[in-house]
Image (spheres, rainbow, N blue to C red):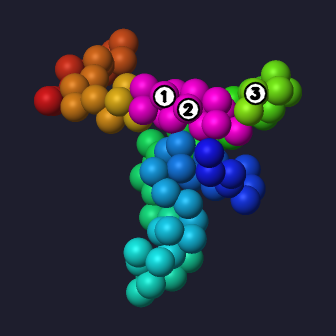
């Protein structure tokens, strides 16, 4: 099993599917890092899985088990956040699809 150098890479792989170095290697002409180019939804999910990762570490899950769970959570949250249709809030006109 591959061991990630740091916790940030576990979060990056869980959400973006690649480490920071892999992203930099694939995007040599872009300045900054992959998080600088993330959507609002991705940044929200990232914040969520950061907290969840801390809990999973506290529960003494292995790095591999944490990555698997965090990836499942990230996929579920991204699917929910990026659903093409959404319910209108009370008092709001119906959202356009």
Q: What span is in magenta?
A: 63-76
Gap in Å between the C-alphas at discs 3 and 1? Answer: 15 Å
Label pair 3/1, CB-CB below 8 angstroms? no
Gap between marks 2 and 1 measured at Cα: 6 Å
Badge 2: how crowded within 10 Å, few (<14), some, or many (20+)? some
In this orientation, does residue 24 appear?
yes
Residue furthest to the top in view is: 90
- Density class for disc 3 (Cα within 10 Å; few <14, some 14-19, many ≥20) is some
Magenta segment: does it hold 68?
A: yes
In the rendered image, which residue does mark 1 sit on? 72
Q: Is residue 77 visible?
A: no
Mark number displayed over residue 20: none
N-terminal-most mark, 3 or 2: 3
Q: Quadrant of the C terminus?
A: top left
The mark found on residue 61 in the picture is 3
Left or right: residue 25 versus residue 80 is right
Name the image quarter holding residue 47.
top right
């Amino acid at each position: 099993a591959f061991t990630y150098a740091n916790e940030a890479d576990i979060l990056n792989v869980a959400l973006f599917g690649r480490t920071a170095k892999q992203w930099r290697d694939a995007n040599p002409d872009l300045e900054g890092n992959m998080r600088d180019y993330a959507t609002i939804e991705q940044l929200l999910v990232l914040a969520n899985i950061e907290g969840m990762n801390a809990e999973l570490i506290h529960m003494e899950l292995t790095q591999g088990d944490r990555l698997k769970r965090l990836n499942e959570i990230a996929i579920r949250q991204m699917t929910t956040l990026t659903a093409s249709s959404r319910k209108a809030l009370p008092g709001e006109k119906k959202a356009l699809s």
